[in-house]
Amino acid sequence: MYAPRPAVTLTHPDWSRNAVLYQLNTRQFTPEGTFRAAQAQLPRLKALGVDIIWLMPIHPIGEVNRKGTLGSPYSVKDYFAVNPEFGTMDDLKAFVAAAHAQGMHVILDWVANHTAWDNALTRSHPEWYERDLDGNFRPTPWWDWSDIINLNYAHAGLRQYMTEALMYWVREADVDGYRADVAGFVPLDFWNTARTQLETIKPVFMLAEWEMRDMHYAAFDATYAWTWKEAMQKIVAGDADTAVLFNYYSWNESAYPREAMRMTYTSNHDQNAWEGTEYEKYGPAREAAIVLEVTGEGIPLIYNGQEIGNPRRLKFFEKDPIVWPAGMSAETQMLDEQGEL
């Protein structure tokens, strides 16, 4: 009766322990911007030491209030379809299978908090959306994301729909989990239930774009180490000394469960597009920051292009592929010709 109960009830997949994550922006990863073209690069990612590939949202993008020419991949038009810009469902399955064959795993970016204005749910279930005082759909109020509208998780039907959508991609495409966009804007009890349901199919890895202790108990394996990143940037800017980093590690050890995985990073799609390249943010301390990220406490993230020191901010709403060194393309072509892919 009085015996302590474990706070953490989830079990991390064995393959996720001490993993290196790689965020792949399909649109910009190759000149073609497709799953098929990205698949040809898998041997290189394996050689780099990547364990988990995080694919940015793979769904069709809304057209109403679209930003730029191609739109934001976080403006989801259909949770059960593949963006034709990237290829087909068969192409996605082939990418996942090829990654598995090389000992890597694949997680999808999942946008549960909001949808595009022209998502079919706006017509079939308009009651599932937040409304403003005039009764209109409510755009996300933070930043300038006028291309998306917020969902309302007070509805059991929405929770069931979204959970079934999450299960669909694990079952049909054999993906290995999810990175949850703005996870803290969605009720935690939804994520707890979704994790339980996903585990009925196979062990999954769940990464939350959030920083909160309780997310680690039953829903998420890993959360963003925002405070680590902020500490590093304060040190580089001369606004703090290394004590601020010591404070992070002390806080993390004291406040978070021992089982919690914290994702450290110096760049990602948000950082690169809106805050600046790693050169802009870290300057001459860039390499030291990356070394600490990779060798220190936590699981490290590589944003595509970091491995070659990509110096550019990649456009978010347009086609703007990474410029890879010629040797990488030649190596990929050689492997392809030898039939090793």
Image: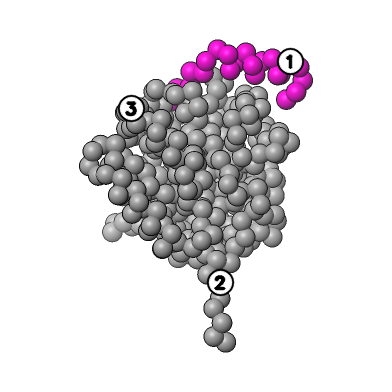
Residue 121: image location, x then y, percent = 51, 51
Does 277 sit left or right of 82 as displayed?
Answer: left
Residue 337 magenta: yes
Measure how far apart labels 2 and 3 are at the Cα level. 44 Å
* Quadrant housing the C terminus: top right
Does 114 sit left or right of 227 as displayed?
Answer: right
Residue at 62% x, 60% y: name it: 11
Mark 2 is on which residue type?
Pro
Tell me the magenta residue range: 318-341
Q: Secondary structure at mark 1?
A: helix
> Residue 203, relative to residue 333: is it above or below?
below
Q: Secondary structure at mark 2?
A: loop
Which is more foreground, mark 2 or mark 1? 2
Which is more foreground, mark 1 or mark 3? 3
- Residue of label 1: 337
Q: Secondary structure at mark 3?
A: helix
- Residue of label 3: 284
